[in-house]
Image: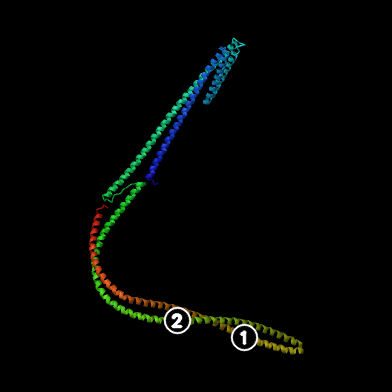
Amino acid sequence: MRLTIRHQILALAAAGFVMVSTAGLIGYRGISQIEDAQAEASAAAAVLKAVGAVDTARVAFRGDVLNAITTRDSAERQGVLDLLGSHVADLRGGFAQIARLRPELADQVEELGATADEMIAAGQRVVTLASRVVSDPEQIGAAEARPGFESHYRTFDKALPELEAAIAEDAAQTSAAAADKAAGARTLTLITAGLAAVLLGGAAVLLARRVSRRIGSFVSAMKALAGMDLTVRADVGGGDELAELGRSLDEVVATVRGAIGEIADNATALISASERLSDTSRDLAAGAQTAAEQAGNASSNVDQVAESVGSANDAAHVLQTSIRDINGAVAEAVQVAAEAVGLATTTNRTIERLRTSSGEVGAVVNMITSIAQQTNLLALNATIEAARAGEQGRGFAVVAGEVKDLSQETASATEDIESKVSAMRGDTENAIEAIGRIGSVINRIDEIQRSIVEAIEVQSQATRSIGDGIAVVSRSSGDITGSIQNVAEATRTTHDGATRTQTAATELAELAHGLNALAGRFRR
């Protein structure tokens, strides 16, 4: 895959972004852990505070019970009762808060709460008995109930420190865990940030060194080119923009090296060509002098050509007249051939009708032959019947004999007619075939005559073109004379130009020598 510098920088930036994001996420996670630890520590402190509140309410509750026994004033007693209710609420509220904040201590809290309820019930019984001022002014009932209350109080007083110790230990563990989490989060954040900085810095240094080293190769190559050294190469490997630039520079150097070589070769060839041009210009000057002399001779020859062109023009007019006469005769022959073709076609149709009539005559002859055969058969039957009749049928026999003779003559005449009709059919077929060949010959003659007409037309056009060309040549002969004079003037100008060309060729040779020397300064 072709990894360009842009891609490398983007990859480095992406890696940095990923590392910074990772460090940020780790830091955020550490902060979350610290916040969680702080929340746990706060919860532990709240639990300890709730335990302290329970302890305070416990002591206050005992004081309220004792005050209820010793107080004689009803108003003070009512105040003691109010405080007693408040402290009972604090006790039970503290246990509820501890159970909510430390669900894992629910069993122990529930057990201690039951002990507290027993203490509260015993205390409330003492207070109730102490309230009987009228019936028990000496507080004997309260005094008797007080030992039971004190017993429950001592039981609760012994159990509460165990809960306080468990909660304090849990709070200490929670604080220690929070401190460990905070320290671990800070350490992990520092390690991640340091690793990201090291990796990004190392990658940036490697990329900078790689780019700097390859740019140094470019600088060296460009300095060598400034010193006219065309053998230098950038030699920058890789597949990024610098490598592509290096290959392009190598291609440019190779192209320039080839161009300088071609310039040197062309300069050498130019020197040789300038020498040949100098020789050619000398020959051109000599040739121009000769052409000027020959132009004078050509002018007199043009006059003779003009006279010959006039004679050719007269002959062309005579030829055009003859071609028009031939064209008229051939056109008349074409018309006659066309009439012959039409006549042959008409004759062919007439003979076709004759062949059809011959067929109809043959059909009639066949019918007559059939009738004669039937008549002969009837005459034979009549003769047989006359013979059977004897003397009475003699006359009928004579008639039957005549009918038989007549039918035989009819049959003979019919055969003669049929043979003649057959002969006529054969002659008709031969006539049709002969007329068809005549028609083909006439058509061929017509085609040939039309070809002759076309050829004569082409010849007539060619003759007209020749006449027109001769006229143009006749008109142009005068122009040719003027042109020859212009040629003579041009040859003199050419002689002068050839002299100047020889001078320019000498200067061009000197320029080619200088160009060759300049190309030789390059190292190739």
Q: In this view, does 13 lie above or below 277?
A: above
Whole-percent x, y for residue 346 in the image:
54, 81
Left or right, residue 495 beside residue 251: left
User: Is tag 1's residue or tag 2's residue first in the polypeptide sequence?
Assistant: 2
| In this rendering, the label closer to the viewer, 1 or 2 | 2
Taking depth in this image into account, of 204 and 309 the one nearest to the observer is 309
- Identify residue for label 2: 330
Whole-percent x, y for residue 314 in the image:
35, 81
- Which structural element holds mark 1? helix
Residue at image x 49%, y 26%?
Answer: 43
Q: What residue type is labelled 2?
A: Val
Q: Which amino acid does label 1 sit on?
A: Ile
Whole-percent x, y for residue 475 in the image:
33, 76
Q: Residue lying at the far front in this picture: please name it.
A: 75
Residue 82 quadrant: top right
Does the image show residue 301? yes
Q: Residues within 10 Å of mark 1 (few under 14, many from 20)?
A: some
- Which structural element holds mark 2? helix
Residue at image x 24%, y 58%?
Answer: 511
- Identify residue for label 1: 417
Does the image show residue 437? no
Q: In this view, does 73 lie above or below 443?
A: above
Inter-mark Cα distance, 1 to 2: 49 Å
The dot on residue 409 is none
Residue 393 quadrant: bottom right
Residue at image x 44%, y 31%?
Answer: 31
Q: How crowded is mark 2: few (under 14 residues within 10 Å), some or many (20 or more)?
A: some
Taking depth in this image into account, of 288 and 255 the one nearest to the observer is 288
Left or right, residue 20 beside residue 514: right
Whole-percent x, y for residue 210 in the image:
34, 42
